[in-house]
Image (cartoon, rainbow, N blue to C red):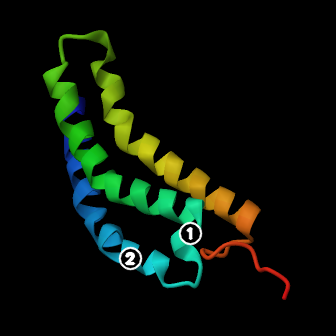
């Protein structure tokens, strides 16, 4: 029963993550954001989220006889942790600006 619940949760999260993926191009509206490594990494991680959700729903069933199969349900959580860490790095190193730190002119 737990396997089915986790699979449904992964699929629902994958479907819900489609909207943020559609909004990903908006990350690059700020001037200089196309050259900011953190912004690019956030965009890549957000686009990868539906894929990791799909993998988190399918791979545990494929590898069910193996001991590590239950851990594969955590793939979407791993991607969410990466996104949160990247936003934290963006906040710390760039002052929360998608275009990078403000340069004094």
Crowd class of label 2 (few under 14; some 14 to 19; many from 20; radius 10 Å): few
Regarding residue 101, the answer to whether it shows in the image is yes
Total count of labels: 2
Percent coordinates x, y for residue 14 in the rendering: 25, 55
State whether residue 33 is above or below residue 66. below
State whether residue 81 is above or below residue 94. above
Q: Residue furthest right?
A: 104
Percent coordinates x, y for residue 30 in the rendering: 55, 84
Check residue 25 in the rendering and tell me which mark sits there, or answer none. Answer: 2
What secondary structure is marked by label 1? helix
Q: CA distance from mark 1 to mark 2?
A: 14 Å
Q: Is residue 21 left or right of residue 102?
A: left
Q: Residue furthest bottom?
A: 105
- Of 13 and 41, nearer the camera is 41
State whether residue 85 is above or below residue 7. below
Crowd class of label 1 (few under 14; some 14 to 19; many from 20; radius 10 Å): few
Q: Residue at x 56, y 75 (%)?
A: 33
């Amino acid at each position: 029963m737990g396997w089915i619940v986790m699979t449904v949760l992964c699929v629902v999260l994958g479907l819900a993550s489609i909207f943020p993926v559609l909004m990903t191009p908006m990350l690059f509206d700020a001037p200089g954001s196309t050259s900011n490594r953190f912004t690019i990494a956030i965009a890549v991680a957000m686009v990868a989220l539906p894929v990791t959700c799909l993998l988190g729903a399918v791979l545990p069933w494929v590898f069910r006889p193996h001991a590590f199969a239950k851990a594969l349900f955590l793939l979407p959580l791993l991607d969410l942790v990466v996104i949160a860490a990247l936003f934290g790095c963006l906040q710390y190193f760039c002052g929360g600006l998608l275009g990078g730190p403000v340069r004094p002119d």
